[in-house]
Image (cartoon, grey):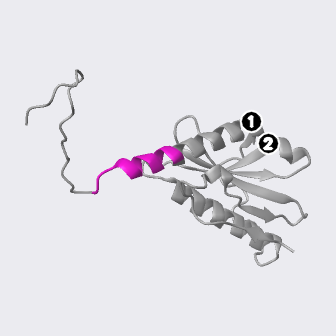
Amino acid sequence: MATLNTHPAPSAALAPAEQPITYQSRRGGVHRVLLGVDGNGVWVVYDVASGGEGARRGLLVDRLLGDQEKASEAHALAVDYAACQSAFAAGRRDELPNPNPLPRATRVPHAVIARHARAATRRVAADARCAEVSPPAGARPVHRRQPSRTGAPVAA
């Protein structure tokens, strides 16, 4: 029986690489669907088998090329991909939803996937920090007088 394990969209508390999205293939193997950020800053989604020969490399499922693509879009794509794969494995679909997601199947070494997953974790953390310090849209900047470096009082 095929199973699908997904969790909520990315947040600062749980980075994309740490959010398990898994499904069970028709052959019974467990696959992890992972998010990453490649060297060009593009969000990517990978399908990684849990064991056997395929475990040395993962399949590049998709690259999100839009300038405004965020972790939430990558996470949604990963969840949808895993759900479709799970449905196929369970016999609820007659064919693979996307047997060859890119023009040609691209296998990626685990070391590269791990590097991209770490980059995704850093990106989500940086985005969360920016969201905490960014003023709301339309807000006016607040200028505060800083004390002088010598400790002398600042004239008002």
- Does residue 85 sit above or below 12 in this rendering? below
Circle 2: residue type = Arg
Q: Which residue is mark 1?
A: 111
Q: In the image, which residues are magenta? A: 125-136
**Can residue 95 be seen by looking at this rendering?**
no
Q: Position of residue 31 (x, y in %)?
A: 80, 57
103 vs 77, nearest the viewer: 77
Q: Callout 1: 10 Å neighbours few (<14), some, many (20+)?
A: few
Q: Position of residue 155 (x, y in %)?
A: 8, 32
Q: Which residue is mark 2?
A: 57
**Can residue 85 be seen by looking at this rendering?**
yes
8 vs 154, nearest the viewer: 154
- Does residue 135 sit above or below 80 in this rendering? above
Extreme residue in the left direction: 156
Q: Where, by quadrant of the figure, is residue 100 drawn?
A: bottom right
Secondary structure beneath label 2: strand
Compare marks 1 and 2 and give the one earlier in the sequence: 2
Task: Give the spatial CA distance, label 1 vs label 2.
Answer: 9 Å
Circle 1: residue type = Ala
Residue located at (50% from left, 48% from top): 65
Q: Callout 2: 10 Å neighbours few (<14), some, many (20+)?
A: some
